[in-house]
Structures are given as structure tokens and as C-alpha cells.
Amino acid sequence: MFTATLGTVLFCSLAALVAGFVDSIAGGGGLITIPALLLAGLPPHLALGTNKMQSSIGTAGALISFANSHLVLWRLALMGLPFSLIGSGIGSNLALYLDEELLGTILIVLLPIAMVCTLVPKKERKDASVSQGSHILVPLVCLAIGTYDGFFGPGTGSFLILAFHWIVGLGLVQASASVKVLNLASNVGALCIFLWSGQIVWAVALPMVVASIVGNWLGSRTAVRLGARAVRIFLTVSLGLLMVTLVIRTLNG
């Protein structure tokens, strides 16, 4: 049974603040919060559930912002919505039934892969036409990435944006806006599984939610001035240090 201390709450809240700030500019916020939760001593199952709670609130805020700007293509987004939910449920159940030690090892393996995928530059396409096979491609993309999101999570937004941009054929801005519907759906689907199974440390999750909201607000205010490239450089350095610490902690058992 994990017991949260004041130090744990402050550390994880700071991570959520930074993650919210970075995520609003360059994406990859979960790549900060999950290692932070694991370093704070939460078992992998509790870390995933607690992270899913704070990330769901942040995604909802981003979706509201995009919807107010009329950038969400609701038809395509709603087409993939049920498949995103199904995938997230599959992924979350897979995570819950894996051995905890094995899951911790898998997270260490997946973390650098998700880091690399998140940090890959997203090139703008001149052709913003939608693929004729979108009615097939959208469900397949949402099912696959929804499963990944339910199981692990970090980098999901970037994967969805890239898939909708390159495979479905949306413009980059519209892709970023539209996939927030799917990202939120998979987040909520996974969150329901974690809530039902009691895999959330509320004493840590609630302060992280508040910190994440503040971080996203600050990040959106400074995104234009700071730029995503600078944040990605910072993200690479900070996550590299977190990764080394996490591996050392795991090896020391």
C-alpha cells in the first residue's frame, strides 16, 4: 500500500506543472510525469492510473481551446471515437494483468522509444486533402493508438497527429485539433478502468491536476515566444537524466 508524503506530493506536482507547460508547447508531457511518479516510489500500476487522471483533465482543456477556434473536424474525430475507447480499454486491461515487475521493465523499454517518437519533427504538408480511405484508416489508427494509450500513454498525442497528418491527410493544425477528441476519449476510457480497479493515488493525483492546469495555461501564454524546438532540447536533457535515475533505481531493486 503506497502512502503519499508531502515530499512526494510536491515532487509530483512540480513534475505535472513542468509537464503541462512543455506539453502545451511541444507535447510529451507524460514523458515527464510517468518517470516522476515512478521515481517517487509509486508502483507502475498506480503511476499509470494517477498519471491518467491528471492527463485527462489537461486534454479536456486543450480540446475546449481548439473547439472555440473552430479547428476540430468533428466528423472524422467522432468516426474514430468508439475505436479509440475500445483500444484504450484493451490497453488498460493488459497493463492491469501484467506482472508488476514485468510492467516496470516494459515501461523502461518503452520510455526511450516514446521519447524518440515524440521528439521527431513534424513536417508540414502542402496538400491538406483527406485520404479517400479515411473511413477505414481512421478506425484502424484509433484502435492501434488507443491500445497504446491505455497501456502506456506518453507520446499518444504526437502519434495521433502524425497519423492523421500523414496517413489520413489532414493539415497539421487540423490534425492536432481533431485528435484531441480521440486523445480525450482514450484517456477517459483508460481512466475508467483505473478508477474501477482503484489504481489512483488521490493524494497525489488531485494536486497534480491543479499543477497541470496551471502549467498548460502558462505554456500556452509563452508558446509563441519560447518555441517548440527549445522545449524539445530541454525535454531531451531532462528526460535523459530521469531515465538514468530510473534505471539505477530499478537495478538497485
Image (tube, helix red, strand yellow):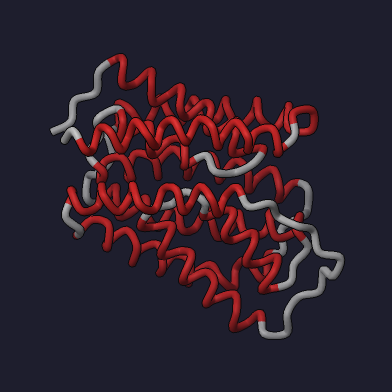
Q: Quadrant of residue 88?
A: bottom left
User: Image check: 46 left or right of 63?
Assistant: left
In the image shown, does 250 or 16 lie closer to the viewer?
250
Between residue 195 and residue 219, name the one nearer to us: 219
Q: Say above or below: 234 vs 14.
A: below
Judge whether 123 appears above or below 35 on screen: below
Residue 149 is situated, as x and y percent measured from the top left of the image, at 43, 57
Tell which of 200 and 229 is nearer to you.
Answer: 229
For this view, does 60 lie left or right of residue 172?
left
Estimate the x, y position of residue 207 in percent, counting from the top left: 40, 24
Question: In the rendered image of this protein, does residue 67 appear above or below residue 213?
Answer: below
Q: Quadrant of the C terminus?
A: top left
At a point 58% along the width and 27% down the height, the residue shown is: 215
Q: What x and y, as percent, mark residue 248? A: 28, 33
Which one is in front, 142 or 226? Answer: 226
Q: Residue at x 41, y 48 (%)?
A: 111
Residue farthest to the left, as pictured:
1
User: At 51% from the left edge and 55% from the top edge, which residue is drawn?
Assistant: 156
- Residue situated furthest top in the rendering: 6
Up/down of 19 relative to 121, above or below: above
The residue that appears at 79% across and 33% down in the rendered structure is 224
